[in-house]
Amino acid sequence: MSKKDLMVIFPGMGYNSSRPILYYTRKLAQKYGYEIREVSFELPEKASAVKGNPEKMLEAFNIALSQAKEQLKDIDYAAYDRIIFAGKSIGTAIAAEYDRQENVNAEHIVFTPVAQTFKYLRKECGIVIHGTSDPWCDTPFADEKCGELGIECIKIANANHSLETDSVQTDLGNLACIMKNVEDFINT
């Protein structure tokens, strides 16, 4: 029986899989033979309208989780040898909670988590890639939660919630570093 691996991509509210981090993550997974499934969310509010409003954040989370469940309902996870959920922003929380509710036992690549993500992640389930200037999740909080969960926290200096800085050259170097970490994780 041949080995089958699956990557499911959970985007952010304003960061879809055509943006660099998720685009190159998908390409790396394809390079190693992963089947790719992508979730998409249709949410009533933009990220800027949700940030800092717990009620709107919970509403967006519940809507996105429901949409993810609907889009992924036909997957037979038992048919795969390895499953990786790659999420960005709110997608990291959706991926972790979906994993918990559905007992998928996926590994996680967590790009720029929101604080709520850490409520749902299992111990030792993957890697976190966090920008130290991310206004959605403070670095000391991310460090603390990753430590509690036994998850490596790869920090990108001065990077925002898109893992970008104010320098294109720095961003390109960071992207190469991020993708090296992603490739190492995928190819283990």
Image: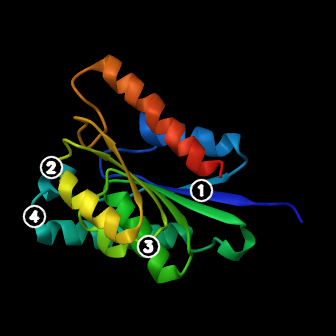
Q: Nearer the viewer, mark 2 or mark 1?
A: 1
What's the distance in space between the residues labelled 1 and 4, CA to CA? 31 Å
What is the number of the mark on residue 115? Answer: none
- Which of 139 and 18 lies nearest the eye of the viewer? 139
Q: Nearer the viewer, mark 1 or mark 3?
A: 3
- Which of 86 and 74 lies nearest the eye of the viewer? 86
The image position of residue 5, as x and y in percent, is 70, 59
What's the distance in space between the residues labelled 1 and 3, CA to CA? 19 Å
Q: Kindly tell me whether residue 76 is visible in this rendering.
A: no
Q: Quadrant of the N terminus?
A: bottom right
Residue wearing tag 2: 48
What's the distance in space between the residues labelled 3 and 2, CA to CA? 30 Å
What's the distance in space between the residues labelled 2 and 1, CA to CA? 28 Å
Q: Is residue 43 above or below residue 172?
A: below
What's the distance in space between the residues labelled 4 and 3, CA to CA? 28 Å
Residue wearing tag 3: 123
The answer to which of marks 4 and 2 sits earlier in the sequence is: 2
Element under label 2? helix
The image position of residue 33, as x and y in percent, is 73, 47
Residue wearing tag 4: 53
Q: Residue at x 22, y 71 (%)?
A: 59
Q: Residue at x 21, y 24 (%)?
A: 166
The image position of residue 17, as x and y in percent, is 46, 43
Q: Are dots 4 and 2 in contact, CB under 8 Å?
A: no
> What is the residue that sits farthest to the right in this orientation?
1
Residue wearing tag 1: 7
Q: Are dots 1 and 3 in contact, CB under 8 Å?
A: no
